[in-house]
Amino acid sequence: MNDDFSVHFPAVAVGNLLDSIPHGIAVIDRELKIVLINEFLEALTGLALADVKGVYVDFVLRSNIAQRGRTFREVLASGEPLVIDGDIVSRDRRK
């Protein structure tokens, strides 16, 4: 990881922190590519971090909220948090 996130936060510590949260979490970079996901999101999607690291978030989080990255770009532009309820489709194409 050659980004600002990995420079400031060791991957092991961040991974442990994210895994302790009982919600699916993906950390993405400014290009909307996945940097980290937690174990809960791995279970929801059926995909491991090794398989999705560096992949465009919409290809992994197939859902009704991403809208081809538009939602993520709006958050990056505004800097404001956003909470949206949505469905995630797993690798087995199940909600």
Image (cartoon, rainbow, N blue to C red):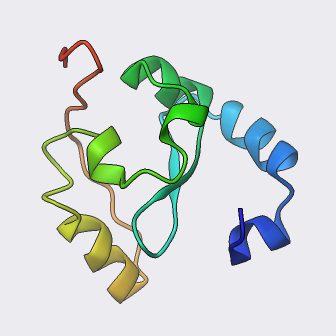
Q: Tell me if 52 is positioned left or right of 45 in this view.
A: right
**Is 16 in front, or is 51?**
51
Q: Quadrant of the C terminus?
A: top left
Q: Position of residue 56 (x, y in %)?
A: 36, 55
Q: Pick the residue in front: 80 or 70.
A: 70
Q: Return the residue nearer the eye: 74 or 21.
A: 74
Q: Which quadrant of the figure has residue 82?
A: bottom left
The furthest residue to the bottom: 77
Taking the spot 20% from the left edge, 32% from the top edge, the residue there is: 87
Q: Residue at x 51, y 33 (%)?
A: 51
* Residue 2, position as x, y percentages in the image: 72, 70
Point 34% across, 75% down: residue: 75
Task: Residue 67: give x, y in percent of width and height.
Answer: 13, 58
Q: Quadrant of residue 77?
A: bottom left
Is 62 placed above or below 42 here? below
x%, y% of residue 43? 48, 18
How many numbered badges does the structure rendering display? 0
Instruction: Please indicate whether residue 18 sits to the left or right of residue 27 in the image.
Output: right
Q: Nearer the viewer, residue 8 or 23?
A: 8
